[in-house]
Amino acid sequence: MTNEFKQDTIALHGGQTVDPITRSRAVPLYQTTSYVFDDTEHAASLFKLQGSGYLYSRNANPTNDVLEKRLAALEGGVGAFAVASGQAAVLLAVLTVAQVGDEIVATNALYGGTYTLFERTLPRFGITVRFVDGADLAAIEAAINDNTKAVFTETIGNPSLQIADIVGISEVAHRHGVPVIVDNTFATPYLAKPFEHGADIIVHSTTKFIGGHGTSIGGAIIDSGNFEWNAQRFPAFVDSNPLIDNRSFVEAAGKAAFVTKARFELGHDLGATLSPFNAWLFIQGLESLSVRIRQHVSNAKAVATFLEQHDLVEWVNYPTLAGNAQQDIAAKYLPKGAGSIFSFGIKGGLEAAKTFINAVELLSHVANVGDSKSLVIHPASTSHSRLTPAQQISSGVTPGLIRLSIGLEDIDDILADLEQALQKAGVQALVTAKEEQ
Ligand SMILES: Cc1ncc(COP(=O)(O)O)c(C=O)c1O
């Protein structure tokens, strides 16, 4: 029923059927590990992916279920699996399609944690990731071979803000029978709709804007239901599986084959499931997502304009600013705005950047984004510090780059804090210039 409603209504009601016994208006928190089976047959059927009911909260939980259904409805997918972190969402999405000997093609402007997972950890398990320039569709196509199991990108790259040409990437990938996985964390379902442009799987770090209040770590995998799992490249989706009564995942789950396989195999075996309490907190966050994002975007635009006009600022990278090279692609994929995370550089380079970050008072210097509070960090020495200098450059992380995540405080207070920190950095830049003379 909820898919018929508009987005803001789905964010409040999606996935919830009011409990007929208690009539609780709020989604109840089912803080339970397990569920009483009807009888032994019922128990056995659940273990084989038959019948209805809950089995154990590592596999599924009624509170998580509401979050999953709500996220799936907001993204326009057929199902979702809520997991313990954004990092787990990326890993489990990849492991649902790839195993030892397989390959993934990834755009190189990614969150540092994802980059390191792909570059250092997945190869230890026999999965090779080929990094390519996300703006170069020919390079993406050239990197796909018989072993490729997915193309991975971020809607808005962290922190380069490179916006993925999801239509182009999906056309290239689908030509070769390969699905596209998109990390939609920076955009949220309010600003971008990757499935409408051809993406097959979406992952989120719900830790960020979806939670919105910096209280909980979590993630989600969402299945569009659109990808045709072909026998040649994806036998594990179409071959009969003894664990589910000799059916295949496609036979057992139809369009939701991907998310069902992710939950049944990796949710069960690896155990990176989201706790119900965090699911419940993310449901609270989702209810106000669109209102918050509208204010995030409005504040971010004001800050980007302020910085762009500031004498002490060298450059600002916010996709919808006049003259930004990504204006057209932003208009196509992010018609309601380019989010509230962006980057800039100040005169005086790295030293001035450090002075600026140490001088902010209202903004918080933390390793996070997408909080209701305004945040700042220096990615080259933190979130992307595990990358080599060359990898940092190819990911769009230059030494002096400062990343901002603009929150919901009064815009005058945000600008005043930025101004006083810029002035301190400006003094520092003058001192450094004098010393170098
Ligand atoms: C774009 C993106 N994806 C995934 C993650 C990982 O999410 P989590 O910290 O919830 O594991 C992050 C974290 O910053 C991120 O920025």
Image (tube, rainbow, N blue to C red):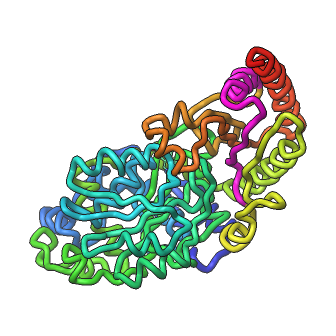
Q: Position of residue 245 (x, y in %)?
A: 12, 75
State the residue lying farthest toward the front: 437
Tell me if I can see residue 13 in this picture. yes
| Front in this rendered view, residue 258 or 43 | 258
- The residue located at (52%, 32%) in the rendering is 382
144 versus 313 height, above or below? below
Q: Quadrant of the N terminus?
A: bottom right
In the rendered structure, the answer to whether residue 235 lies left or right of residue 162 reads: left
In the rendered structure, does residue 344 fall within the stretch colored magenta?
Answer: yes
79 versus 154 height, above or below? below
In the rendered structure, the answer to whether residue 332 lies left or right of residue 208 reads: right
Q: Quadrant of the C terminus?
A: top right
- The residue located at (69%, 66%) in the rendering is 8
- The residue located at (47%, 46%) in the rendering is 391
Tell me if I can see residue 66 in this picture. no
Q: Position of residue 381 (x, y in %)?
A: 54, 31
Give the image quarter of residue 168.
bottom right
In the rendered structure, the answer to whether residue 401 lies left or right of residue 117 reads: right
Q: Position of residue 373 (x, y in %)?
A: 70, 37
| Front in this rendered view, residue 218 or 43 | 218
| Front in this rendered view, residue 323 or 339 | 323
30 versus 333 height, above or below? above
Q: Which residues are magenta?
A: 338-361
In the rendered structure, does residue 192 fall within the stretch colored magenta?
Answer: no
In the rendered structure, the answer to whether residue 144 lies left or right of residue 341 reads: left
Q: Position of residue 424 (x, y in %)?
A: 82, 21
